[in-house]
């Protein structure tokens, strides 16, 4: 998500979500499963029509969506205010209300993101790795749509546009199930998408919405492996676990980001401070914000007091290992620093809290990251090219950075326009999931009445 | 699998498997889960060591495996004869005993396949799609190993080598669980792999074997989403369903192949007959064998009697739709043809039986394939380039052919050396799964203390 006021998309959802404390739902009724299967089958039929459209037609559709988001911003914002009012009346937390908000400024940013997607090259074009085999076949691969993408998300209504637009760019259709808090906004956005599809001569059913507040509806979707090609859950850990436990449909799962930045002995310390400030303090509640800073022992005495002062001014408090603690405390009594407790180095803080540990060398930093990292985003700040390359090669994570903030792990920042999720799984897609990641492949082979011998 | 006497690998497993009739197992005991988790953790630790080896070291390991398969062929064949004797005593069907057999000739072919894999370029080399982003980052992707691959398979012991070798090529480790029928052969092969790993200075634990005959062991593996990155089930439909229903680990699933060849009006009929004979009669029990022939109405009167005669000689019997029936019957009284019954056009025959239907045009053929195909392998025989391109574009299957036998859908034939499975799912890998498909990606980004604005 590149929308400026609303970045870090999937990220924020991993903070405590409204559903986190709910008990697991019971099995869905056969009627509910049948209802959603019928909906998904209609979506599947619509997908086949979308797949026959040209890339130009699909991009034109996306430009129409962007134009409609601008033209109807007033009505959309009004629908959103209904959700906000209901949320306030229900006592939703301010952070949740902020996620729910889709005002005219955010709508304008969303429309700009959609135009970025429309302008991206067509991931379905051309053939990949063409080759002539000794058996006589001319073999190649083509990218094809995944098909029907199911999405289960929570309070953020812009996700409706993000996922639908990424999917339509690559000729997929979607079955969306957003959070009840955003119901009016989501229905208005889905209505807009349907009208744009119809205006482009495509079936509105290519964007389906499951207007079912009960959590059993999620389980019903997860049973539809005959009609859904993938389900993308975006939400808290309880939603992820529900999906892992019950899904018959393949999943594209995001996960926790326990994110490290290692400040090597050779790093330029002034610039390292700026990177850490960016990675921790700009948007602390997102999954790509740094959680633990590892500092080389050789620079700890000079760097840690400066870190405490610089980030302390931004309201950051510290959880330090025994070696880092005295240097941080040295910054002065106003530094909020305490000894790291058990598990503190395994936590995704999603807040203005930062773990700090001193390590003896690159190997110790790599060891700490291997033990405590969650495979999301990891960075090294160094002037040593050998250390930089070793870090890139040896750290096992979706995104690995040299001399950059971890905050870049985001579909918008990676040039995808919008983001469907940030995958921390290893199958199919890893890291930001954009339109190109919603594709599969098809092998195409041409022969001359070629037969196989043996 | 390119081993000549044993091709079509995963394929054959989809025939009625020994476990097909077994009841679903109960939940695995916590002790069993803990035992397999400990095994898989050791494999995971071993994988990290394998990942630090160079591509040359891994290829040298594979060449050592090939040499050992040759050098120890006598002992391996002897271990296999123990399994065969036990199988005969237990009354296994001849087809199953054939799958179980790993004699010196098949071992020699297996060794050759391993050498093909050793000679393939390293899929982990280099960086993909490097680009400079406006935000200041130099971004690229690298291929990385999936990690630890679990595999559950049945009677065919060569699968032990196929999967281990494909995995080690791309620096993965494996947890294997083969069928009880092949226990002695599998243990001998795993011992060989372990000695080759040790000889290469790598941990033998990178190839682990679950020597547990009870089916609960499969469920225990499927629970290990904290240590296994993927599970590949190879077997009958009951095994696939067990995995879909219970797995917390992402799956790479094969599936049924209901395979079509459409003989267009413009096809060269002599050569079309040769392709059909190859696709049906050479190895009828495999998933890439043709199940239904669709014949353009314009050529049905001339082509169908010849088809009946040519394939009839090979022992093929026919299930025909009402339009095809009279033309097939015309070939003579010795033609075994009957009217197709309900569901006959949805069947994977795995036998010398062939469905035949007459269609009016390309659209009718595409419609039939969309309704009845399973997305495995589909072919058109035509001299019309427009029809050829439409077929390639519009048929939704893992492999789509123009003027070729469908029998090529196979890792060996596609140049992968060995084959882990033939995936009919859309996520991650579709079609033959070779060493390159056992990789994930990692984003690498280089900046100059680059921070994100907004």
Image (cartoon, coloured by chain):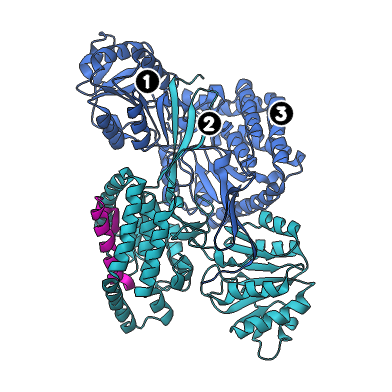
Chain colours: A cyan, B blue
Q: CA distance from mark 1 to mark 2?
A: 33 Å
Q: Secondary structure at mark 3?
A: helix
Q: What residue range appears in magenta?
A: A181-208
- x 73%, y 70%: residue: A268
Q: Is residue B92 visible?
A: no
- Could you tell which of marks 1 and 3 lies nearer the N-terminus? 3
Give the vertical position of A62 relative to A301 (above or below).
above
Q: Residue at point 45% right, 58% down? A: A244
Q: On the picture, is B24 further left or further right than B180?
A: left
Residue bearing the label numbered 3: B67
**For residue A195: magenta?**
yes
* Residue sitting nearer the eye, A64 or A84: A64
**Can the viewer see residue A308?**
yes
Residue located beneath label 2 in the image: A131
Give the main secondary structure of the magenta stretch: helix
Residue A151 placement: quadrant:
bottom left
Along the line of sight, which residue is nearer the eye, A199 or B25? A199
Gap in Å between the C-alphas at discs 2 and 3?
30 Å
A299 left or right of A249?
right
Q: Residues within 10 Å of mark 1 (few under 14, many from 20)?
A: many
Which callout, 1 or 2, points to the residue nearer the camera?
2
Res. B257 image quadrant: top left
Q: Is residue A130 magenta?
A: no
Residue A243 appears left or right of A173? right
Q: Is the Cβ of the residue at disc 2 closer than 8 Å to that at disc 3? A: no
Residue picked out by circle 1: B352
Q: Secondary structure at mark 2?
A: strand
B237 relative to B81 in the view: left or right: left
């Amino acid at each position: 998500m590149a929308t400026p006021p609303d970045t870090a998309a999937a990220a924020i959802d991993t903070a405590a979500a409204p559903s986190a404390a709910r008990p697991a739902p019971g099995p869905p009724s056969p009627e509910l499963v049948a209802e959603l299967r019928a909906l998904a089958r209609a979506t599947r039929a619509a997908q086949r029509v979308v797949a026959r459209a040209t890339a130009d037609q699909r991009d034109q559709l996306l430009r129409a969506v962007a134009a409609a988001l601008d033209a109807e911003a007033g009505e959309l914002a009004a629908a959103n205010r209904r959700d906000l009012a209901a949320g306030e009346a229900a006592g939703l937390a301010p952070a949740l209300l902020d996620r729910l908000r889709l005002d005219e400024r955010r709508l304008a940013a969303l429309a700009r993101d959609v135009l970025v997607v429309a302008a991206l090259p067509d991931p379905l074009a051309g053939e990949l790795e063409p080759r002539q085999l000794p058996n006589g076949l001319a073999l190649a691969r083509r990218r094809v749509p995944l098909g029907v993408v199911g999405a289960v998300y929570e309070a953020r209504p812009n996700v409706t546009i993000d996922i639908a637009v990424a999917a339509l760019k690559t000729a997929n259709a979607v079955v969306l199930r957003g959070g009840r808090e955003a119901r009016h906004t989501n229905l208005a956005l889905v209505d807009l998408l349907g009208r744009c599809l119809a205006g482009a001569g495509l079936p509105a059913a290519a964007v389906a919405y499951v207007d079912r507040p009960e959590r059993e509806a999620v389980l019903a979707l997860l049973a539809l492996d005959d009609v859904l090609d993938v389900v993308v859950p975006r939400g808290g850990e309880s939603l992820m676990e529900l999906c892992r436990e019950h899904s018959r449909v393949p999943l594209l799962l995001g996960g926790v980001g326990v994110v490290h930045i290692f400040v090597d002995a050779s790093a330029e310390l002034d610039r390292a401070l700026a990177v850490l400030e960016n990675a921790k303090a700009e948007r602390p509640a997102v999954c790509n914000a740094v959680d633990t800073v590892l500092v080389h022992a050789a620079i700890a005495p000079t760097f840690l007091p400066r870190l405490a002062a610089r980030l302390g001014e931004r309201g950051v408090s510290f959880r330090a290992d025994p070696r880092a603690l005295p240097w941080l405390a040295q910054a002065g009594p106003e530094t909020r620093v305490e000894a790291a407790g058990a598990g503190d180095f395994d936590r995704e803080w999603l807040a203005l809290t930062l773990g700090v540990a001193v390590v003896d060398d690159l190997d110790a930093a790599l060891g700490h990251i291997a033990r405590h990292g969650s495979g999301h985003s990891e960075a090294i700040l160094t002037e040593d090219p050998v250390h930089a390359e070793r870090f890139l090669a040896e750290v096992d994570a979706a995104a690995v950075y040299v001399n950059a903030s971890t905050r870049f792990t985001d579909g918008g920042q990676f040039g995808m326009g919008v983001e469907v999720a940030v995958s921390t799984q290893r199958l199919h897609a890893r890291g930001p999931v954009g339109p190109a990641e919603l594709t599969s492949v098809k092998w195409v082979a041409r022969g001359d009445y070629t037969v196989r011998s043996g």
